[in-house]
Image (spheres, coloured by chain):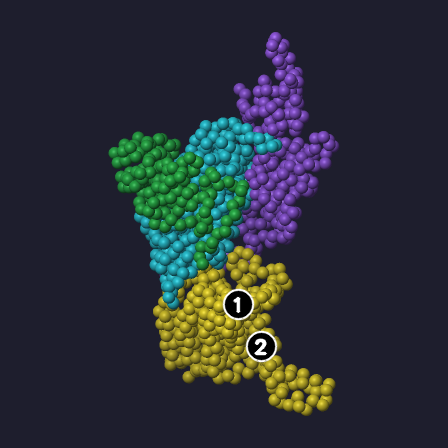
């Protein structure tokens, strides 16, 4: 066969989401790749300019559909900085709890999709099944399984219901056992190791140069986790370790994510203990929970009045399950944010695709892209 | 690292191309510079100040002018820094950062198509999120949300 | 063993039908009860019965896989149509049958349509050769094992033809992979079979089964069994060797462009081949329709007992394939070929030597020394 | 700092003998487990919100985890109690997707027709902002989630249809938010007021009363403004902060503010 370009996407089993990977192949070898994004571009940054501060939260859940809480948290932190609001401590703990459950949920989703790319069929179902337990917990206190709309500028919507923490601990116990099962299915399998070792290598230098963050960077031996390096919310009070591996290949990324889930369990146990013993308010003072921080009632005829808030610019960065996400919110004192800009980790991770795909086999593309953990919702926004 | 440190390090290199460094909560500071000093600033930030990681590049449309915002991360200082440069709206261009940080490539493509800021010497300035041949720049204030634009878009691959 | 073979049954049926017709319309009685006419009709009936049996079994096999796989995955599998979903596959088949058959632009019409048809037909022929039980068919083909394997190895040609003519890059890559894979795994299969042939001294499947009345061949030939099962997985294109249709990167591999009935052909033929593969394992290594001697004779003396035990073994062997599918990832092309040429062939050669040694010393260590029939 | 490793510190590279044994054993264990009861819920016959299945549905028998007593929290189709709706418009205002429209329902007062929300579920994102904003608790969300219909027009639920959902006594979202303590309130700019009574007339909670103000003595040469000598006084404990008074005020003399 001579060289040819094939389009893996936008409707292709390899693309988890809607994007297109153009691959130049010679036989089974990959010569060049060219990712094409934009099939899922909804203009969230533009729509945000037309919404009240709290209404943007509904968009954040749809930004990354497997890690909605992380994006809510990201936006909320930036908006609170732009509006000069401090949330109460219990709200911060609840946010951290949501974040970490979301990390487990997102990693389980990744696990399911990743093993499916390798042709492993039953772990796909196991991952989805166990993720459902996490979603059940979300549903218990937010009322929705995917689009939570739980955090508010200045706090969170409501407290967890009674009995929630015990239930959550049971789920954590269950998950602890499952992680062992996942390892038996993957790391215990010679075929898995044959497929994934020395695959998709992206060394630390290339990672930094191409803006690759998150588990991919930590799998390359760089110890970098914003929860440790730049603690937001209450991560400073919590004891946990940063997962890290050195091989920089697909196996290393698998190990890092698995270890992160175990660390999330550890964080969650501490947070649940704290929540049991420290009741408190959910919202900062004098903030209605539904309309947006600069309280902006409207008359029946669209007649706007506002309380003026001082101008400000907010910048926040959180360690999202996929990597490092940043938000930049400009508040010009109006009802709506003047400009909202998000930095999606997967955006950068995909942009380096040429570095870690070229030179491998066509059959290696799905596991490598699986180990990147692509979420197109947040790439295209 | 604080704003004063940044100013001390950057002033000798940039001179009056540095407009000032203001403190910014949660970061090392916000560096305002003229676009003529972009290349020198990028190189100094990466090589001297060890901001090895370009986190994002974004554009803001202030109607009369546009602002390019760069966010950097340093693994040694474990801090973010923000660079921002104003470019006039009728002549919005600035030197690319992708020669210094390859990660700027896609971010600049995005800023180019959405906020209409052109990046000189960019290796691959193509549409990323919007279709090829799309003539509008959605994140400009003049692009109204509620008035859908009619446009015939050619497909990317023939 | 029972003397009523499937062919004799169909011959009797044909004779009965023709006689009844002749009884109703006396003038044509003499010409249509001619032996030649009866034979032709008997062959047709024989074919129809075989077709029905093979299709039913294939569909049952798909159901079996769906149910088993469901439990492996902590779910239920098909359960709505019919009892426990038994009729689900018929429903799926009717759906596919009703669907429009389409052909991509610039696809080669001849290859596009003849590929799946030939694939299906050759797979069905296989079923006619295999002796399901002593009374199933005449079983008198002296080289039935060789014939079965020869027909079994037609598949890469037809797959490649249909892949190439569907004018799709994924199909082409899948076809190439399929051809490479099947050719690589023909050799270990044949070598593993050679050790069986050495031990039994015959190329006839019926003889091979009868040779196993004292001991099944999997004991002395366990290496050959492993090689045969692994290579059969590759021949059947099932996980972990399903690269030709690896859906993660090749969409559906060589049948990407097929839909409707043509896809159903591929699907059915695939499962038919899986059925034949399981049957071959049972015939060659697990004693066919016979049971160990310590089993009370009541278990084997009722009518159709042979078929029952045979099918039970076949479905259990296929369950093993499903188990493998449920727990292992897919390998890569180069790894597959490396395993095929570097591991499977030496192992198969080893088992050939082992079989030869066993026959030479006329002694089967596992089950004690018995007079070897092959010598 | 943790080196990433498998949970029991073992991997296949250390024991190549195992090859495929461990994953196959794990799958077999799961197979044996799900022979008793797979974790799936047979949806049309078993439902998560059905209390009978709450404790049965478990990944492992005997350890019910997952669904529980808080399912009532679910944000599904809205239920509207027309009787207690005060037409304050807050739900429509708080809707980010602009899917709520206030439509007239037949009421007893023809002069001031009652307006209740009509929801277009084709647009609704189930964020729950409307039920959070509802001051009377008459618009809540229920556990109903089956809405599929072949006609787009049927996705628009009129107030009467929403009222039927309310009457079907589905479990409703139990969480109600209170107004913050020292929230902004309606303030008056007295010199601009003409005492027209529009605010008091349209106030959905009737918390505005028009009180007489003393008519100032006109100084010689000064012309008194033509107005009714009354001023609105807002009862803050009853006020739901809907802003209707502000929007109907012809002179824009009412505004939001915080009073010490």
Residue on which disc 2 sits: C50
Residue C154, compared with residue A246, is above or below; it is: below
Image vertical order of residue D105 relative to residue A362, above or below: above
Say left or right for D4 vs D57. left
Q: Is residue A72 left or right of residue A202?
A: right
**Residue C368 sits in quarter:** bottom left
Farthest-out residue, left: B12
Q: Colour of chain D?
A: purple
Residue at x 47%, y 70% (from the top left corner): C165
Tell me the SS state at disc 1. loop
Q: Which hue belongs to chain A?
A: cyan
Residue at x 51% of width, y 80% of height: C206
**Quarter of the image with the N terminus of chain B in it:** top left
Identity of the residue drawn at 59% across and 43% down: D124
Q: Quadrant of residue A300?
A: top right
Vertical comparison of C86 with B154: above or below: below
Query: Which chain is home to disc 2?
Result: C
Q: CA distance from mark 1 to mark 2?
A: 31 Å
Q: Nearer the viewer, residue D62 or B141?
A: B141
Q: Is residue D13 above or below residue B40?
A: below
Q: Nearer the viewer, residue C255 or C211?
A: C255
**Image location (x, y in percent) of residue D33:** 53, 56
Tint of chain C: yellow
Q: Which mark is drawn over residue C103?
A: 1
Q: Position of residue C34 (x, y in %)?
A: 64, 90
Task: Tell me the subunit letter for badge 1.
Answer: C
């Amino acid at each position: 066969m001579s060289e040819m370009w094939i389009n893996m996407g936008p409707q292709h089993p390899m693309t988890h989401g809607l994007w297109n990977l153009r691959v130049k192949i010679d036989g089974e070898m990959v010569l060049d790749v060219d990712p094409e994004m934009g099939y899922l571009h909804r203009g969230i940054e533009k729509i945000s300019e037309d919404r009240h501060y709290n209404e943007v939260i509904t968009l954040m859940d749809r930004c990354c559909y497997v890690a909605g809480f992380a994006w809510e948290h990201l936006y909320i932190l930036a908006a609170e900085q732009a509006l000069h609001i401090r949330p109460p401590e219990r709200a911060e703990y609840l946010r951290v709890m949501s974040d970490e459950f979301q990390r487990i949920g997102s990693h389980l989703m990744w696990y399911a999709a990743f093993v499916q790319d390798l042709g492993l069929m039953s772990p796909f179902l196991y991952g989805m099944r166990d993720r459902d337990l996490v979603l059940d917990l979300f549903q218990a206190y937010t009322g929705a399984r995917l689009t939570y709309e739980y955090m508010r500028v200045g706090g969170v919507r409501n407290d967890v219901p009674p009995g929630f923490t015990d239930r959550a601990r049971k789920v954590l116990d269950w998950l602890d056992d499952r992680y062992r099962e996942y390892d038996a299915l993957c790391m215990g399998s010679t075929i898995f190791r044959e497929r994934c070792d020395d695959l998709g290598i992206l060394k630390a230098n290339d990672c930094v140069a191409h803006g690759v963050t998150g588990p991919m960077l930590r799998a390359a031996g760089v110890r970098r986790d914003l929860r440790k390096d730049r603690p937001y919310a209450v991560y400073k009070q919590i004891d946990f370790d940063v997962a890290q591996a050195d091989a920089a290949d697909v196996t290393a990324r698998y190990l890092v994510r698995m270890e992160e889930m175990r660390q999330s369990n550890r964080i969650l146990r501490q947070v649940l203990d704290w929540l049991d013993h420290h009741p408190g308010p959910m919202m900062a003072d004098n903030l209605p929970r539904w309309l947006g921080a600069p309280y902006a009632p409207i008359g029946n005829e669209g007649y706007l009045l506002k309380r003026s808030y001082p101008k400000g610019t907010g910048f926040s960065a959180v360690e999202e399950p996929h990597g490092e996400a940043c938000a930049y919110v400009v508040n010009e004192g109006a009802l709506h944010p003047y400009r909202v800009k998000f930095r999606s980790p997967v955006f950068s991770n995909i942009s380096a695709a040429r570095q870690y795909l070229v030179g491998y086999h066509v059959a290696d593309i799905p596991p490598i892209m699986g180990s990147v953990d692509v979420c197109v919702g947040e790439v295209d926004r | 690292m604080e704003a004063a440190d940044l100013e001390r390090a950057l002033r000798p290199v940039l001179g009056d191309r540095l407009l000032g460094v203001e403190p910014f909560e949660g970061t090392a500071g916000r560096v305002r510079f003229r676009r003529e000093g972009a290349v020198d600033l990028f190189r100094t930030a990466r090589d001297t100040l060890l901001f090895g990681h370009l986190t994002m590049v974004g554009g803001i449309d202030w109607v009369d002018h546009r602002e390019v915002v760069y966010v950097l991360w340093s693994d040694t200082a474990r801090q973010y820094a923000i660079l921002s440069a104003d470019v006039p709206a009728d002549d919005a261009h600035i030197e690319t950062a992708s020669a210094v940080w390859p990660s700027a490539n896609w971010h600049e493509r995005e800023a180019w198509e959405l906020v209409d800021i052109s990046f000189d010497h960019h290796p691959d300035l193509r549409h990323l999120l919007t279709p090829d041949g799309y003539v509008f720049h959605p994140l400009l204030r003049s692009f109204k949300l509620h008035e859908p634009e009619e446009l015939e878009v050619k497909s990317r691959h023939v | 063993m029972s003397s009523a073979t499937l062919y004799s049954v169909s011959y009797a049926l044909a004779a009965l039908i023709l006689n009844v017709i002749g009884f109703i319309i006396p003038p044509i009685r003499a010409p249509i009860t001619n032996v030649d006419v009866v034979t032709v009709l008997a062959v047709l009936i024989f074919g129809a019965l075989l077709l029905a049996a093979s299709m039913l079994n294939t569909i049952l096999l798909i159901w079996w896989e769906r149910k088993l796989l469901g439990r492996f995955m902590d779910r239920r599998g098909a359960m709505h149509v019919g009892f426990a979903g038994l009729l689900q596959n018929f429903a799926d088949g009717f759906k596919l049958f009703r669907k429009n058959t389409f052909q991509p632009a610039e696809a080669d019409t001849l290859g596009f349509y003849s590929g799946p048809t030939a694939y299906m037909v050759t797979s069905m022929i296989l079923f006619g050769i295999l002796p399901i039980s002593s009374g199933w068919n005449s079983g008198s083909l002296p080289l039935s094992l060789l014939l079965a394997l020869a027909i079994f190895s037609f598949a890469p040609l037809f797959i490649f033809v249909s892949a190439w003519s569907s004018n799709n890059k994924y199909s082409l890559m899948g076809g190439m992979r399929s051809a490479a894979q099947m050719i690589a795994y023909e050799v270990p299969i044949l070598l593993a079979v050679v050790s069986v042939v050495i031990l039994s001294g015959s190329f006839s499947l019926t003889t091979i089964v009868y040779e196993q009345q004292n001991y099944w061949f999997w004991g002395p030939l366990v290496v050959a069994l492993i090689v045969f099962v692994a290579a059969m997985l590759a021949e059947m294109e099932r996980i972990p060797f399903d690269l030709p249709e690896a859906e993660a990167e090749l969409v559906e591999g060589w049948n990407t462009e097929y839909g409707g009935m043509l896809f159903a052909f591929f699907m059915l033929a695939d499962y038919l081949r899986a059925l034949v593969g399981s049957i071959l394992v049972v015939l060659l290594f697990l004693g066919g329709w016979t049971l160990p001697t310590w089993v009370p004779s009541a278990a084997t003396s009722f009518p159709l007992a042979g078929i029952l035990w045979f099918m039970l073994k076949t479905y259990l062997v296929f369950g093993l394939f499903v188990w493998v599918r449920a727990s292992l990832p897919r390998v890569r092309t180069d790894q597959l070929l490396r395993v095929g040429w570097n591991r499977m062939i030496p192992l198969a050669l080893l088992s050939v030597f082992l079989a030869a040694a066993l026959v030479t010393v006329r002694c089967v260590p596992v089950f004690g020394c018995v007079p070897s029939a092959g010598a | 700092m943790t080196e990433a490793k498998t949970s029991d510190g073992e991997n296949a590279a250390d024991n190549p003998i195992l090859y495929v044994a461990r994953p196959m054993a794990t799958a077999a264990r799961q197979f044996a487990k799900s022979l008793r009861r797979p974790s799936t819920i047979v949806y049309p016959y078993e439902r998560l919100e059905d209390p009978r299945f709450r404790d049965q549905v478990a990944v492992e028998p005997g350890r019910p985890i997952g669904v529980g007593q808080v399912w009532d929290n679910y944000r599904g189709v809205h239920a509207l109690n027309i009787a207690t709706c005060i037409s304050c418009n807050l739900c429509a205002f708080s809707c980010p997707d602009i899917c709520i429209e206030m439509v007239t329902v037949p009421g007893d007062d023809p002069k001031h027709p009652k307006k209740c929300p009509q929801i277009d579920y084709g647009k609704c994102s189930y964020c729950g902002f409307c039920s959070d904003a509802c001051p009377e608790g008459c618009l809540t969300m229920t556990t109903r989630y089956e809405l599929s219909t072949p006609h787009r027009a049927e996705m628009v639920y009129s107030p009467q249809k929403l009222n039927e959902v309310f009457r079907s006594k589905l479990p409703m979202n139990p969480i109600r938010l209170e107004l913050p303590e020292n929230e902004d309130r309606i303030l008056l700019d007295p010199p601009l007021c003409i005492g027209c009574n529009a605010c008091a007339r349209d106030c959905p909670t009737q918390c505005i009363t028009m009180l007489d103000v003393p008519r100032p003595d006109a100084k010689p040469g000064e012309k008194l403004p033509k107005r009714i000598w009354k001023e609105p006084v807002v009862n803050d404990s009853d006020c739901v902060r809907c802003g209707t008074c502000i929007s109907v005020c012809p002179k824009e003399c009412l505004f939001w503010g915080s009073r010490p």
